[in-house]
Amino acid sequence: MEVEMLNSTAAKDLVGEACVVCEEVKSVGIHLYTAFICKECEKDIIHTDTDNPKYKYYLKQLKKVNNPEIYS
C-alpha cells in the first residue's frame, strides 16, 4: 500500500490559512509578505474610507505583517 504525502502548498489549499485580519481560516485570498489576507477582508480594506472606525482596526491587524512570528 502506497501513501502519497501532500506538499505544504496543496495542504494549505485544502485546509486554508488563518487570515491576519479576521483570524478565520479561509482558502481564498492573497499573501502579503508573511501574512495571508482572505478575499473578503481584502475587499473590505479596499472599500473602507479612512474616516470609518473599521479603518483603524484594519491598520492594527495589518501591523502584524511587519512583525513575523518567532518560533523557539
Image (cartoon, grey):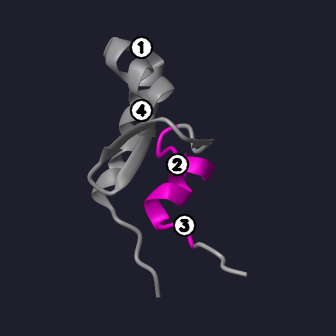
Mark number displayed over residue 13: 2
The crowding category of the residue bearing disc 4, from other C-alpha atoms within 10 Å (few below 14, some 14 to 19, many at least 20), is some
* C-alpha gap between disc 1 and disc 3: 42 Å
Q: Position of residue 27 (x, y in %)?
A: 54, 40
Is residue 15 on the magenta stretch?
yes
CB contact under 8 Å: marks 1 and 3: no
> What residue is shown with label 1?
52
Q: Amino acid at mark 4?
A: Tyr
Q: Earlier in the sequence, mark 2 or mark 1?
A: 2
Q: Are marks 4 and 3 in contact (CB under 8 Å)?
A: no
Q: Is residue 36 above or below residue 38?
A: below
Mark in front: 1 vs 3? 3
Q: Nearer the viewer, residue 12 or 38?
A: 12
- Residue 33 shows up from this direction: yes
Can you identify the residue that label 4 sits on? 58
Q: Secondary structure at mark 1?
A: loop
**Rendered residue at 35%/65% (across/down):** 68
